[in-house]
Amino acid sequence: MIVTTEQCTVVSITQNPIALIERAGRVCYKSEDKTCPGSGVKLVTKLIESGHESVLEHANMTVKVVCDRGISHEIVRHRLASYSQESTRYVTYDTGAVILPIFDDSSGNVPLDEQIGFDLLAGEGAFADLYTRLTSIELRWLFACLNDMRTYQTQIIDGVAPQMARANLPTCLKTEIFITMNMREWRHFILMRGGTGAHPQVALIADAIYRYLYSVNPVLVKNRVIQKPLPDCRIIKIKEEL
Ligand SMILES: Cc1cc2nc3c(=O)[nH]c(=O)nc-3n(C[C@H](O)[C@H](O)[C@H](O)COP(=O)(O)OP(=O)(O)OC[C@H]3O[C@@H](n4cnc5c(N)ncnc54)[C@H](O)[C@@H]3O)c2cc1C
């Protein structure tokens, strides 16, 4: 069984989103002749400040997120989006991977390299390393997961279909989900999932998306901040595969 952490990869984004939004926005005012260097940022600022955010819907971004099934369930509540998610009906988990939960969001969590994880079948060495790095709360969780995975795998061997055996899988099961949203909806996602009441593991994802959009152009996340305090050791390094 692999223990791993969240990942975010930007797989597609509208080329020059500010220019596209500006072009669309200027149609409303027939002010195309006012387009000049820097005018896009000024216009997008005005659109956001006046609540005329529908113009932002012309720009899109697709992100591949690796998270647990509980967090993916929160994500798919956002309706103005397209999703493609790994299926527990069609995928059989021979090894199984789980996302390390954040049990105490004020103290953070043990840092894990999200690329590597730990293969508990790889030998005692890997397990010994985990044993020294996890807290007693995390270890108790780990043993419960191992038990769930063993029950799942035993049922698969006994001929139970994956879509039925999945009843044994834990909420922290690792899942992969492709998410396409327009910029207005990503802004809404950041607002809701980066707020103080957000689950820390969805806030990590909102934070990664916030930082990525900020790097493209800060105006895309104007009036948005991540309010949820996040554990430093779990900050997601967002990747790009454009
Ligand atoms: C901290 C937190 C706690 C939560 N707790 C719970 C909980 O206990 N139980 C629970 O069931 N959910 C819970 N949710 C989920 C929440 O209720 C929303 O389903 C989720 O955040 C999606 O947001 P949304 O509905 O604003 O917008 P989205 O689906 O992202 O849509 C974006 C916006 O489009 C508009 N819109 C979309 N669909 C419609 C529509 N049909 N009619 C009118 N306008 C629409 C709205 O303005 C909406 O804000 C929680 C969310 C958060 C952030």
Image (cartoon, rainbow, N blue to C red):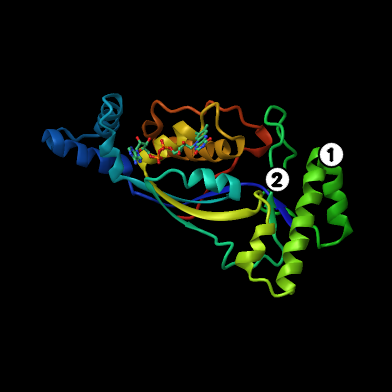
- C-alpha distance separating marks 2 and 1: 13 Å
At x 41% / y 35%, what residue is drawn? 188
Residue 157 as seen in the image, left or right of residue 218: right
At x 57% / y 68%, what residue is drawn? 90
The type of residue carrying mark 2 is Leu
Image quadrant of residue 202? top right
Labels in figure, total: 2
- Which mark is first along the chain, 1 or 2? 2
Whether residue 68 can be seen here:
no
Image vertical order of residue 114 relative to residue 194, above or below: below
List the residue tagged with mark 2.
100
**Pointer 2 and pointer 1: residues touching (CB < 8 Å)?**
no
The type of residue carrying mark 1 is Ser
Image position, residue 233 (x, y; %): 68, 36
Q: Secondary structure at mark 1?
A: helix
List the residue tagged with mark 1.
136
